[in-house]
Image: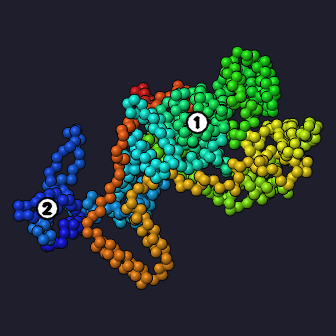
């Protein structure tokens, strides 16, 4: 037989092998003295078995049987391929039904690869990914690949995305990101041995969001994210919907003052030297020292929840624990003034003789960092804890766990951030497209309805609705300020309690202030001020400076129009072209094709187009994947496992994935232990008999 090319004869023999039920491979190729090229296509079971097992008692399986079935051909000088000899007999069984399992018959088309990559980035595991393709193909026998092939391809794609080494892969990723958007900012800190210590990065969207939401941030390092035990340290703010917004993040190798100083300085440079007005952290001396150096003018607040959760640990052994706890909570949460707090604190100390308690002494000296009555005169966006950072940490659950490598972490970080951005976009649309009805006829409620986002307007409506629990009375006139007392009926532990608040109102300059400091703390007018406005007959409008700009929906914020600085991890131009073509084909297929004639017309058109495109391909196109960035100054080594600070294990938060794995392992150990105990008991009974 004669063929026009080597590829044609190879395809012919492959189809023959598939119909007969054996695999094929090219086993030799050489140039002859006559100028011709000779090659051999043979059964995949040709050749002699050579053991590669290190254990002679456990030999590896082999397919080699020295089968002589083959096809010999030569490429003539004019380009024609002539078959010189053929051996058809095999020394083993053939099975056409099993031919799809041979490697030569496995083929994964570009559209399949595209679907695998998309589903992988969406977080769909390979098993479900493959099962969906089985259903689509109407059975395993109709697929030209298996689940293992899908798994191998996904592993290969992930390696191509970020390279081989963790540190080097992150560096390559950051360089690519900066090429896409010059506003992408990153710093990699290495030690004297060129080993990665710390890394910080913030994309263009984070930097733009800081312009609007950088007045107050929370910072927390209590979440482990990777196999190097490097804590994930996000800077988190609050956007106009009250949602957490990422303002930069880091992976740290240590948690000492030097490392935090480096991080805060780097973050400040990233944000063009604009420091936050307020920052919330946990009770950490290293953080405190670094903040005093880098952000000397910022108000530093300790997380109230982290501090108060230590109460059982510090006083659990006291016989009067419940009473001490009740008095401490009353002093912290119920004090309306500094003098009130000091009075309650002294009462607790005197009553239970706690003068020598070192922990109480320490937190009392730093009371301006955590007691609500000492910090509520500053805008904190309604936050008193690092819950925002922790919620951002928990947001990454399902994407990362303690076994995640650094290069996997960067990849999953992008996926989680996309989800976060989509939620903000949905909230923007909700505030743009819908209006929450007012619950009163007051003009100021309608004013805030038009100005605030839906989420923040709901919070304002809570204050409007709670006016019914308040009773307002005029007390006195001091200069231009009218003093009002507002008595609010609060429900505490199923008991009604009256609490008195003092409101100062300068009607001339329209300046109004309440001792609860809700507006200063949260940016929303409190119910007590609203009651005074109602009593004064000023229910139409309030000055614009009482409509806090951070909660407004009518401001065009730059970060919402910046394309998210997330790397296109697909990165394969060929697959992108295939994707566009598939979308177009799906659109054609979705048109109502009601008759067999219409279907035949479409199929013939696709067949003609396929022939036309195939004829244009004179030579195979090789798509090269860029594995690394060239001309790097130096190679950065992977980090060493980070050492902890010696704090209790409960300090660290584990991801949901880690918790599930730990629970399963514990369950297996328990069952195996019970099984051993049962066996031992049975043996004892038998021996006694």
Residue shown at 41%/56% (left/top)?
Answer: 571
Circles 1 and 2 in contact, beta carbons < 8 Å: no
Task: Give percent across and percent down for residue 184.
Answer: 50, 47
Give 386 or 22, whichever is nearer the viewer.
386
Task: Give percent across and percent down for residue 346.
Answer: 78, 21
Q: Quadrant of residue 97?
A: bottom left
Q: Which residue is mark 2?
A: 39
Secondary element at image label 1 = loop
Please determine whether, in this image, residue 69 is positioned above or below residue 171.
Answer: below
Q: Which residue is mark 1?
A: 220
Q: With 214 as the anchor, is 490 left or right in this view?
A: right
Secondary element at image label 2 = strand
Task: Give percent across and percent down for residue 215.
Answer: 66, 41
Q: Tell me, yes or no, if residue 211 can be seen here.
A: yes
Query: For residue 328, which numbered disc appears in the image?
Result: none
Label 1 vs label 2: CA separation? Answer: 65 Å
Mark 1 vs mark 2, foreground winner is 1
């Amino acid at each position: 037989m004669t063929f026009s090319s080597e590829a044609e004869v190879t395809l012919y023999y492959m189809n023959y092998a598939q119909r007969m039920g054996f695999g094929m491979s090219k086993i030799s190729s050489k140039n002859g003295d006559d100028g011709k090229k000779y090659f051999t296509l043979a059964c995949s079971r040709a050749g002699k078995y050579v053991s590669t097992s290190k254990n002679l008692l456990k030999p590896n399986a082999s397919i080699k049987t020295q089968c002589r079935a083959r096809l010999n051909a030569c490429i003539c000088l004019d380009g024609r391929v002539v078959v010189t000899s053929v051996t058809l007999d095999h020394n083993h069984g053939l099975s056409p039904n099993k031919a799809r399992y041979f490697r030569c018959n496995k083929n994964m088309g570009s559209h399949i690869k595209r679907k695998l990559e998309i589903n992988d980035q969406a977080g769909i595991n390979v098993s479900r990914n493959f099962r969906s393709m089985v259903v689509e193909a109407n059975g395993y026998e109709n697929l030209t690949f298996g689940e293992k092939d899908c798994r191998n391809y996904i592993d290969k794609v992930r390696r191509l995305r970020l390279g081989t080494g963790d540190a080097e892969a992150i560096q390559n990723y950051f360089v690519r990101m900066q090429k896409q958007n010059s506003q992408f900012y990153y710093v990699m800190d290495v030690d004297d041995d060129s080993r990665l210590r710390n890394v910080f990065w913030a994309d263009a969207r984070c930097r733009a969001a800081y312009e609007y939401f950088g007045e107050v941030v929370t910072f927390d390092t209590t979440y482990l994210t990777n196999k190097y035990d490097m804590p994930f340290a996000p800077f988190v703010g609050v956007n106009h919907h009250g949602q957490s917004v990422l303002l930069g993040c880091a992976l740290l190798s240590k948690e000492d003052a030097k490392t935090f100083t480096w991080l805060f300085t780097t973050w400040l440079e990233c944000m063009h030297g604009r420091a936050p007005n307020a920052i919330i952290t946990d009770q950490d001396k290293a953080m405190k020292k670094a903040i005093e150096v880098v952000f000397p003018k910022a108000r530093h607040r300790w997380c109230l929840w982290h501090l108060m959760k230590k109460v059982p640990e510090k006083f659990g052994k006291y016989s009067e624990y419940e009473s001490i706890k009740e008095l401490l909570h009353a002093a912290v949460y119920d004090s309306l003034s500094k003098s009130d707090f000091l009075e309650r604190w002294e009462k607790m100390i005197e009553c239970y003789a706690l003068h020598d308690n070192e922990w109480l002494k320490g937190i009392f000296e730093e009371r301006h960092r955590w007691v609500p009555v000492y910090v509520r005169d500053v805008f904190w966006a309604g936050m008193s804890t690092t819950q925002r950072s922790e919620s951002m940490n928990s947001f990454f659950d399902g994407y990362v766990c303690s076994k995640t490598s650094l290069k996997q972490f960067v990849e999953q970080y992008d996926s989680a951030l996309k989800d976060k951005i989509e939620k903000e976009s949905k909230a923007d649309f909700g505030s743009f497209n819908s209006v929450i009805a007012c619950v009163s006829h007051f003009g100021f409620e309608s004013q805030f309805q038009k100005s605030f986002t839906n989420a923040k307007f709901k919070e304002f409506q809570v204050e409007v609705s709670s006016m019914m629990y308040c009773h307002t009375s005029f007390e006195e006139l001091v200069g231009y300020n009218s003093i009002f007392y507002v008595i609010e009926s609060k429900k505490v532990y199923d008991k009604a309690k009256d609490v008195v608040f003092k409101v100062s109102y300068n009607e001339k300059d329209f300046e109004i202030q309440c001792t609860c400091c809700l507006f200063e703390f949260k940016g929303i007018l409190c119910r007590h001020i609203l009651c005074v406005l109602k009593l004064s007959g000023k229910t139409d409008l309030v000055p614009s400076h009482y409509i806090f700009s951070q909660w407004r929906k009518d401001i065009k914020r730059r970060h919402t129009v910046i394309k998210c600085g997330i790397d296109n991890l697909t990165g394969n131009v060929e697959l992108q072209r295939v994707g566009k073509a598939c979308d177009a084909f799906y659109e054609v297929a979705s048109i109502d094709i009601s008759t067999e004639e219409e279907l035949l017309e479409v199929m013939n058109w696709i067949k003609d187009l396929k022939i036309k495109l195939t004829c244009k391909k004179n030579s195979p196109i090789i798509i090269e994947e860029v594995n690394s960035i060239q001309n790097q100054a130096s190679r950065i080594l992977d980090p060493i496992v980070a050492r902890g600070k010696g704090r209790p294990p409960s300090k660290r938060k584990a991801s949901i994935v880690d918790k599930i794995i730990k629970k399963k392992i514990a369950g297996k150990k328990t069952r195996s232990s019970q099984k051993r105990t049962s066996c031992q008991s049975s043996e004892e009974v038998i021996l006694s008999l």
